[in-house]
Image (cartoon, rainbow, N blue to C red):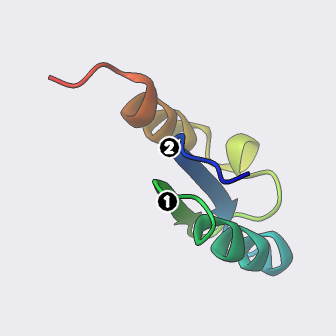
Amino acid sequence: MACTAPALFVTGAIDEKFSRLAAKLVGSVKSGRHVLLDGVGHTAHLESPDEFLRLMRSVTSPAK
């Protein structure tokens, strides 16, 4: 079954393994997007919390 819901994959650019996996996954999701956060690794949400929060708000906030 294919995923039709929008999906945002966020990975740290230093985390090569999960960045590769996210790049593959994004191709299998119709409305998928992959964002690499520069200078961070496996725990992107902890290493770059402001940027991570900005991304989450961009996909959860109502359109204006």
- Image quarter of residue 58: top left
Q: Give coordinates of residue 45: x percent, y percent.
A: 70, 42
Which residue is tagged 1?
A: 33
Residues packed near mark 2 inside 10 Å, few (<14), some (14 to 19) or many (20 plus): few
N-terminal-most mark, 2 or 1: 2
Asked whether, in this view, residue 58 is left or right of residue 32, the answer is left
Secondary structure at badge 1 equals: strand
Residue occupying image coordinates x 49% and y 58%:
30
* Marks 2 & 1, CB-CB < 8 Å contact: yes
The one nearer the camera, 19 or 46, is 19
Q: Amino acid at mark 1?
A: Arg
The one nearer the camera, 30 or 39, is 30
Q: Give coordinates of residue 8: x percent, y percent.
A: 56, 49
Which numbered tag is attached to residue 6?
A: 2
Which numbered tag is attached to residue 41?
A: none
- Image quarter of residue 13: bottom right
- Image quarter of residue 42: bottom right
The one nearer the camera, 20 or 46, is 20
Residue occupying image coordinates x 74% and y 75%:
14
